[in-house]
Every structure is written in structure tokens, then in C-alpha cells.
Image: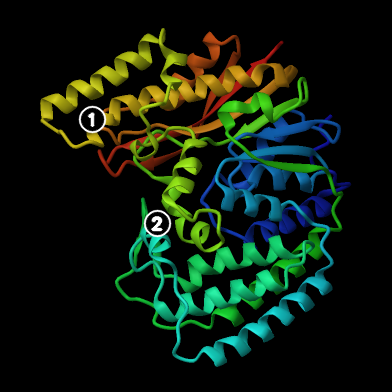
């Protein structure tokens, strides 16, 4: 019997699923797999309330939230500090909603007063901070108001509420205050927002979050821990023999620079203030694109004997030479492939002593064709690597297909299902 859906009848089950939709409406920030996918594998893995689920690439916490809703303990690992903040906030449901709203209202009133006092004397970022963000990410007046709001939030800091207030700020900074747009890669809209009601919008977001958290707080409050760490180095993060299941979606090997997606809020919230900070942040990430590859990287040693990965990398390099593509980034394509799969091998090896006997794992990954249109069958290769490390490969489920921007072919997104028998 599965303990996942704790409903007495169909009506109760429908009510739980209606609530499921609400919890994911309050903060949609980083695209990820849908909640129903997590629910499906919790059922298939027969994960009950006495089990513990790991998401080692947890993003904003989809897996952790689903587990928490059903009273299942969970652990997340996230290397991006601003995304880590979001995941922590989404999994804390014990806030005093009225007190949070009152505190945010106090901040808003003080921020309004300071905006009026400043008049035309606009606050702005330092030259170094400007260099870290995409040009024209945010217009001068909204930036001025956002910096004043952050200044007041800092002065009125309350540990009970600050994560909610910062998360509300991060969400609206991107979607309401900034000029950013999102497609395959983050960019800037042609039509810039000259002015925005920054403080009002932020306050409304805090109120929405407070009301939703008060609602969700009635659910069984299972433990949920989110570590700011490198998923390739779980040895120093997780307790031995502590994980019953893994449900996760690592980055795919392509040219998407994930650090750019959250650069603006990372800079304004103080997580990144220099190029040194940015490099330190990128070095914690799985090597999935050429913009976070460094000469000192060594993860390729983990696939040094994997003929399939080595031949794939070699074919990409041969294609580059054939096409006479000689940019610095293009010359790194073959190395990214080796570092990516080497990093995943390192992760899976480090994970083994943390898994309980019989633990089941689900990795959502997608095929890619970003590198000179050469197909990277991510799921199949990951399954081969896992098998070589002693995991049983249970199946590779088709999750969905998507259109490749490079080849216009339909590419597979799959769920690689593994088991560790110990």
C-alpha cells in the first residue's frame, strides 16, 4: 500500500489536487518538471511518510514541495544561492501570516517615504555590479525604487520574515520591475519599463505568499532541508544510508548559461558582487555549458574509460574542424560533453553510500543537439554510466518530446529509472 495520497475518498483526493495547483501558482520562477511527475514517481516507488527523498538538483523545490504536502521528509541540494533561497522559502510553511504582512506593510510605508525624499536623485548600482548584469536589465527609476526597498528591508530585518520578503522581491524584480524576457535564453525586451510601482507590487506579492503559506501550513509539516552545495560532492552534505529515493532533473548538456537566468536578482540581493563571486558560484555548478568550464576542471576523469562518451566528444570535435568553427566557445564543446557526463558519474558515485538498500532513483533528462547538430542521447548515456557504477537500470521512461531549435527534430525528454541494491 502506498502512503503518498493520504485521502479517505475521491472527494478528498480531488481537494488535495486542487490545493496542489495553488501551491505551485504562488511562485513560478524557474521552469522545471511539473508536480504531477513527482507525484507519479512517489507512487511508483511506494514512498511513505517514514521515507526520505533527495533532490540533488532541486532548483526552486518542486520535488521538495510535493514531498512536504504528503508528509514525506526530503532533502534538496542547490548550488545557485538565489534559487536556494527560493527553495528554502517554498518549503517553510510555519510563518505567522498576519505578522509577516504587518512587517512588510511597515517596510513599504518607510520605503514610500524615502522614494519621495530622494526625488530625482536616483540610486544605482556600482560599476562592477552593472558589469555583472545584462545591459538594460532594469531601467533607472525602477532600479532606484528597488534599491530603496532593499535598503529598508535590510534596516527592518527580521529573521522570521526576511526570506519571504526577499523571495517576493526576486520574483517581482524579474517579472514586474525589470526589462527581461525569457525564451531559450534570457534577454531584454525592446520596450523598456520607464517606471513601475515597485513597492506596491512587492507588498502584494508578500501578502499573496503569506496567505498561501498560512493555507499550506495546515498540512502535515514534514522535515525539508535545502543545502547550498555542489551536487557532485554529496559526500560532505548527506548522512550515510539516509536516502530512500531520488527524484530530480539535472541541467542538460547545452549552451544555456543557467547563471544568467538569475543574474539580476543575484546581484541586487548581494549573492554576487564581483567577478570573483560569479566564478565561485559557477564552479559549484555541474559543467553543462561552455561558460562555466575552467582549465582546472577534472571531472572528465570519471568517464575516462567510457567509450561512448569519448566517441561522442570526438565526433563533436571532428565536426567543428570540418566546419572550420574556431571560436573559443566552439573549441570547448567536446570538453563540455566529457565534463558533463563525468560530473554526473562523480555525482552518482558519491551518492552510493548515502542510499539505503533498495533505493530507487528518477533522473529527468533531455536529449540535445546544440553542438553542431550532433545528437546527445542524454538518458541512454546516463543509464550506461549508472550501470557501470553498479546501479540497476530499471527503465527509461519517455516523459515528453520537444522541438529542437537547432535541428527542428523532436527530441526526447526521458526519466532514467535506477535502483541501488547496496
Q: Quadrant of residue 127?
A: bottom left
- Residue 392 on image: x %, y %: 61, 12
Q: On the rendered image, what quadrant is the C terminus found in?
A: top right
Count of numbered badges drawn on the protein: 2
The secondary structure type at the circle numbered 1 is helix
Q: Quadrant of residue 249?
A: top right
| Residue shown at 81% from the left, 30% from the top | 51
| Residue shown at 70% from the left, 16% from the top | 353
Q: On the rendered image, what quadrant is the N terminus found in?
A: top right
Q: Nearer the viewer, residue 200 or 155?
A: 155
Q: Nearer the viewer, residue 203 or 125?
A: 125
- Residue 53 on image: x %, y %: 73, 33
Measure the C-alpha gap from mark 1 to mark 2. 24 Å
Up the image or down, 223 lies above or below 417; here it is below
Residue of label 2? 132
- Residue 313 on image: x %, y %: 30, 20
Q: Residues within 10 Å of mark 1 (few under 14, many from 20)?
A: some
Up the image or down, 95 lies above or below 408; here it is below
Residue 80 is tagged as: none
Q: Is residue 246 in sight in this rendering?
A: yes
Is residue 40 shown left or right of residue 46? left
The secondary structure type at the circle numbered 2 is helix
- Residue 78 on image: x %, y %: 60, 41
- Single out the residue that lies furthest toward the right: 8
Residue of label 1? 331
Amino acid at each position: 500500500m502506498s502512503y503518498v495520497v493520504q485521502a479517505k475518498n475521491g472527494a478528498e483526493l480531488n481537494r488535495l489536487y486542487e490545493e496542489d495547483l495553488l501551491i505551485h501558482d504562488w511562485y513560478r520562477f524557474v521552469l522545471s518538471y511539473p508536480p504531477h511527475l513527482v507525484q507519479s514517481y512517489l507512487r511508483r516507488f511506494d514512498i511513505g511518510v517514514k521515507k526520505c527523498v533527495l533532490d540533488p538538483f532541486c532548483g526552486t523545490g518542486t520535488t521538495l514541495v510535493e514531498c512536504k504536502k504528503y508528509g514525506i521528509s526530503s532533502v534538496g541540494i542547490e548550488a545557485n544561492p538565489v534559487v536556494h533561497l527560493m527553495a528554502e522559502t517554498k518549503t517553510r510553511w510555519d510563518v505567522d501570516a498576519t505578522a509577516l504582512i504587518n512587517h512588510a506593510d511597515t517596510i513599504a510605508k518607510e520605503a514610500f517615504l524615502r522614494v519621495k525624499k530622494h526625488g530625482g536623485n536616483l540610486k544605482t548600482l556600482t560599476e562592477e555590479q552593472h558589469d555583472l548584469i545584462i545591459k538594460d536589465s532594469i531601467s533607472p527609476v525602477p532600479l532606484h525604487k528597488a534599491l530603496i526597498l532593499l535598503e529598508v528591508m535590510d534596516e527592518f530585518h527580521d529573521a522570521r520574515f526576511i526570506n519571504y520578503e526577499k523571495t517576493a522581491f526576486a520574483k517581482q524584480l524579474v517579472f514586474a520591475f525589470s526589462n527581461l524576457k525569457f525564451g531559450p535564453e534570457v534577454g531584454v525586451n525592446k520596450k523598456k519599463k520607464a517606471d513601475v510601482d515597485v513597492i506596491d507590487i512587492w507588498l502584494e506579492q508578500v501578502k499573496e505568499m503569506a496567505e498561501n503559506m498560512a493555507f499550506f501550513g495546515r498540512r502535515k509539516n514534514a522535515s525539508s532541508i535545502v543545502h547550498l552545495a555542489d551536487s557532485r560532492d554529496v559526500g560532505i552534505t548527506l548522512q550515510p544510508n539516509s536516502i530512500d529515493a531520488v527524484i530530480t532533473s539535472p541541467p542538460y548538456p547545452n549552451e544555456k548559461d543557467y547563471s544568467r537566468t538569475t543574474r539580476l536578482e543575484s546581484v541586487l540581493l548581494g549573492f554576487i558582487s564581483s567577478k570573483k563571486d560569479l566564478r565561485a558560484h559557477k564552479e559549484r555548478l555541474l559543467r553543462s555549458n561552455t561558460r562555466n568550464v575552467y582549465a582546472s576542471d577534472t571531472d572528465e576523469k570519471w568517464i575516462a574509460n567510457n567509450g561512448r562518451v569519448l566517441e561522442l566528444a570526438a565526433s563533436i570535435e571532428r565536426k567543428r574542424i570540418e566546419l572550420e568553427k574556431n571560436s573559443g566557445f566552439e573549441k570547448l564543446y567536446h570538453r563540455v560533453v566529457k565534463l558533463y557526463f563525468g560530473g554526473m558519474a562523480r555525482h552518482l558515485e558519491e551518492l552510493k553510500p548515502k542510499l539505503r538498500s533498495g533505493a530507487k532513483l528518477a533522473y529527468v533528462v533531455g536529449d540535445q543537439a546544440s553542438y553542431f547538430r550532433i545528437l546527445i542521447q542524454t538518458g541512454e548515456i546516463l543509464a550506461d554510466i549508472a550501470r557501470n557504477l553498479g546501479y540497476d537500470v530499471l527503465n527509461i521512461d519517455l516523459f515528453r518530446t520537444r522541438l529542437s531549435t537547432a535541428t527542428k527534430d523532436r527530441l526526447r525528454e526521458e526519466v532514467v529509472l535506477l535502483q541501488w541494491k547496496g
